[in-house]
Amino acid sequence: MTLAEVAVGIFRLLYLICVLILTAYAAGTVYILYSYVKHYGKQVPRPAVAKDEWPKVTVQLPLFNERYVARRIIDAVASLDYPRDRLHIQVLDDSIDDTSDLITPRINQLIAEGMRIDLIHRVNRKGYKAGALAEAMPLTDGEFLAIFDADFIPDTDFLKRTVPYFKLGDDIGVVQARWGHLNANDNVLTRAQALAIDGHFGVEQFARCNNDLIFSFNGTCGLWRRACIVDSGGWSADTLTEDFDLSYRAHMRGWRFFYVRDVMCPGELPAQMSSYKQQQTRWAKGSTQVMVKLVWDLLRSKLSLRKKIMGVLQLFQYAIQLVILTSLVLAPIMLVTGSLAGLPLAPLGVLSLAAPLLYVLGQQALKQDWRDRTIYFPMLMVLSSGMVVNNSRAAIEAFLHKPSEFLRTPKFRVANVRSTKTWQRSQYMTLVGKGIIWEILLAIYATVAVFIAGQFAPSFIPYFFLYSFGLSMVALWSLAERWIASHPPTPPSAPAVETVSSLGK
């Protein structure tokens, strides 16, 4: 056997492993769809709570450099319809810009009006968001703790529509509400993100909850039972996704989570490609860190085999990008060498239809005009394909235990303003990272693969073209933002965003 034949044999084996892993992952998505259809229309009545039975609730607002949105979220939680003697607000501010100066007068005003609200300003970011939450918990007596990121705006009845579900059982550790969108119509990037998030909250979280599967607290717009946090080991900062980490530890301790789909809390989607990539990097690296940290504990836990399998697949949700990237790189070689013969590609092709169907069902479940929104599904596919390099790099860093700072997603308060280009004049605007060169190189490689497929297997042309277009779009969009950063637009005659000092007047 020649060296070339050995190399082809190795490539074929690697490609087969990728196909089998992707098939198993796609089968997990099919099971989610089965669970969704099985429980479609299921509603759990909200338990009644007597006037004198409302428990003590602490609302925690972790902030870091949120000058555009900090005042808004403080005003929103201060307006919550909940007994004032049982509501405590903690503003956990780690900011190093002028955010603290901008919100302090409003907090003092609320204190003067009788609101129990504390500003906890740390002199360092030790533990980042997890550290802030952990340090604040001993300073409050709330039985339940609601967490809101700075860019979300809960309705006034949020607590009264979510807290009662803890009465379903003393083992309910988390009640999670659905994310909505303040700026879904800003551009094609935000529209694509909205479709993906709606699929997650409209179908996946609903299916996991109602079929008694592991699902995660989403970091915001939900409540924890204090006893659950303590029993599960508390907040930990050894991963970038402290919510995902604590959720799995809680499930393995026997706690149940409950998801309330009809309670929606809208938030801001990243309108800037670099901000979106930064967010995805944190989520991809953090979730992979949790997988490395907890997968063996999960497999050894007392949970059912069904929960373990679906839990492992959820832990793998971003690490799967590495498998996708590997298969993309190997595919042209497989075509040229004629090594695809006999490989089980048909099951993967069929099962892969589950993912787009999930997003369609997510729109059908949440939007009356869901048919009109299908026009943006191709954009979601392009965006997902274009993020394969960004997310794979993050997963690799997690496997290599490479430390990194918790980089928050910049918030620009772009909702309901005259100009959707507010971020272009923001001091929080992020710039493209070093990974762009790999996006460009892989885009070129995928483009070459299109021509290879045209000669050896035309059915692969759409597959390679999707990655060629997606990677090119993500790279060029990022480069365009770098150009904008060096050539900022002239501010409009009237401000596109309210100043923080004017909010609430």
Image (tube, rainbow, N blue to C red):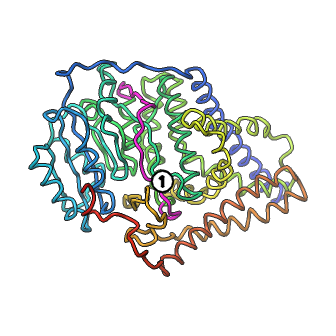
> Is residue 26 or residue 267 the one in the foreground?
267
Whether residue 207 is visible here, answered yes or no, is yes
Query: As shown in the figure, which amino acid type bears the numbered disc 1?
Result: Asn
Look at the image and tell me in which quarter the C terminus lies.
bottom left
Which residue extends farthest right? 455
**Residue 260 appears left or right of 35:** left
Q: Quadrant of residue 413?
A: bottom left
> Is residue 83 or residue 198 the one in the foreground?
83
x and y percent of residue 276 in the render? 50, 58
Q: Residue at x 38, y 25 (%)?
A: 256
Q: Which residue is mark 1?
A: 183
Q: Residue at x 21, y 38 (%)?
A: 58
Which residue extends farthest bottom? 487
> Is residue 389 or residue 2 the one in the foreground?
389
Look at the image and tell me in which quarter the N terminus lies.
bottom right
Q: Quadrant of residue 490?
A: bottom left
> Is residue 313 or residue 374 the one in the foreground?
374
Q: Which residues are magenta?
A: 252-275
**Residue 216 appears left or right of 305:** left
Whether residue 403 is visible here, answered yes or no, is no
Residue 257 inside the magenta-drawn segment: yes
Q: Residue at x 52, y 53 (%)?
A: 395
